[in-house]
Amino acid sequence: MHALGASLDLLLHADDIHASYDQRRILKGVGLSLHRGEILGLIGTNGAGKTTLMGVLAGSVKHDHGRITLAGEKYVPDSIAEAQACGVGLIPQNFHIDPELTITEAIFRGTFQSGRSHAELRDQAGKLIRDIGITMDPDAKVGTLIRAEQALVEVLRMVAEEAQLVIMDEVAASLPDHDVAVLHQVLRMLTRQGRAIIYITHRLDEVRSIAHRIAVMRDGKVHKIVEASKTDVDDLAFLLLQHELERISRPSGPAAGGEALRVSNFSVEEKVRDVGFSVAKGEIFGLVGTHRSGVYQLISALAGIRPCTSGKIYVNGTHVHIRGPQDAQRLRIGYSPDAADTLEPGTSIAEGLQQGAGAGAESLRDEITHLRGVAEVVHRMRINTTNIQGALSTLSGGDRQKVELARWISTDCDVLILSHPSRGIDIGAKEIVYKMLTQLSQTGVAIILLSSDLSEMVNWCHRIGVMRDGELVTIEANANTNEDVLVHHMLGVKFESGSSEARRVKV
Ligand SMILES: Nc1ncnc2c1ncn2[C@@H]1O[C@H](COP(=O)(O)OP(=O)(O)OP(=O)(O)O)[C@@H](O)[C@H]1O
């Protein structure tokens, strides 16, 4: 499966690349090569320099030293536009498309084709969509698409731009497995046309299933490049962390505490119908479902972001009404959404960790008033920075997410709803996050967790509720479930059991 289908033409060669931000050396002599038709996986711990390296290739970061050739020619792009003109395109972490654009407008925005007539572009968009074997209306608004479909629009933009090298920086981070499978199929098709792809992810099973070779970055250098077919997840974890991944023991038995939250006959418009469940104090309760399952509407109603249409909510046994975020806050329900960075980029790291994150801001401040406290959080979560007074924008994507998460974990809530808390976080830091969540739950906090990574749900949660078509179809006790069972309930389709990789291929 991993053998290179296309010829082994060298497309890109980078040698001894150095780059810095404000005198701080980030890339310290990177070497990398890539062939036409190849998918190169790129993995590394948070702050290793992956995004910076991709910035050098895509024209947004200047390197201080080193040589790059593209198709045999010297390549030193001065800007993103110049890199695009040379055939190199990047889909960034947390990419954003204006939701008001139509799919046609989104595909051709910023490309050399954007000057053509709308009718021509619309026809061309329809053809591109058909060619990659998916169904989408070129006139539909981007705002009506789920995240996975928006990712495909970004891929189509690369095709429209005639990119020869497509860089994907954690584009699949919060996508569920079945959406990742579609994205992978499309990417394989692009490589059959001779394009090359650099694919960054923190999910080691995913990188093994998509890449031909995998480059492991550590501290500003490519430490090793391995053949995907000759490695496994444990080897990759060892290469990344330089120690073996600690095996997390799944929660055994139910959480012991009394009831923290209960919803009954709960409905949100047509999206959530007659849902009932309760979460105990000290429990980590997972909720899974596809984008259209109603799971997001359910939790946003619990957080007061949208009204429920009918049903009852009980907090600590008392019937309550949640009519807005302030009500949720007053009831000590915290909600960390699956949005990109919610903090202003200019905020300092220390301020980011000190800012009240909704409920219980006072006690958060108490807890980490002193910079020593902040420094401890930074150290514990392995946030890469030399200056805690520096702006959040100077952190890597994964490290910014750690700051977001740390302030929520320090917030004084009775119920904490976390949506995709580990997105963008490397596998070593995930263990730390898991331990922090477990410790938090042991203080009696009820945690409701959403994640598209089902192995994480199975490893972290006491029980997992599965939503499909607006209904809560089952609540699985951890001891009785696995990822295949969850997928089966989520999609209402029967899957053969097997490794996550096998499942991904079958979907
Ligand atoms: N704009 C910036 N200004 C200053 N320092 C920066 C800036 N962007 C990144 N850095 C620093 O460069 C280092 C490498 O960041 P980079 O984003 O390349 O890491 P990464 O490997 O992509 O991490 P992640 O997996 O978290 O996305 C980090 O330690 C970060 O603090």
Image (cartoon, rainbow, N blue to C red):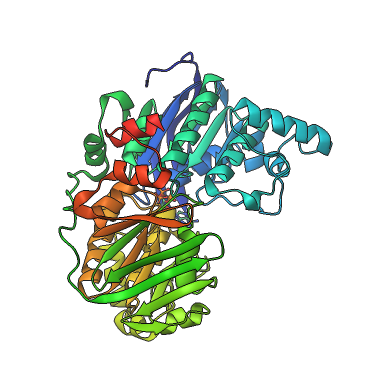
Q: Is 396 in front, or is 192? A: 192
Can residue 243 be seen?
A: yes
Q: State the image coordinates of residue 64 (x, y, percent, origin top left).
A: 49, 43
Instruction: Name the residue furthest top.
Output: 7
Residue drawn at point x = 34 percent, y = 35 percent: 495
Q: Is residue 480 above or below residue 72?
A: below
Q: Is residue 197 above or below residue 415?
A: above
Residue drawn at point x = 30 percent, y = 76 percent: 260
- Where's the C terminus, which quadrant? top left
Where on the picture, by quarter, is residue 159?
A: top right
Q: State the image coordinates of residue 343 (x, y, percent, origin top left).
A: 49, 68
Residue drawn at point x = 38 percent, y = 34 percent: 504
- Where's the N terminus, which quadrant? top left
Q: State the image coordinates of residue 124 (x, y, percent, origin top left).
A: 74, 30
Q: Is 385 in front, or is 105? A: 105
Q: Is residue 294 left or right of residue 452?
A: right
Can residue 407 be seen?
A: no
Q: Is 62 in front, or is 497? A: 497
Residue drawn at point x = 50 percent, y = 62 percent: 297
Q: Is 212 in front, or is 492? A: 492
Q: Is residue 177 above or below residue 134?
A: below
Q: State the image coordinates of residue 468 (x, y, percent, origin top left).
A: 44, 51
Question: How many numbered discs?
Answer: 0
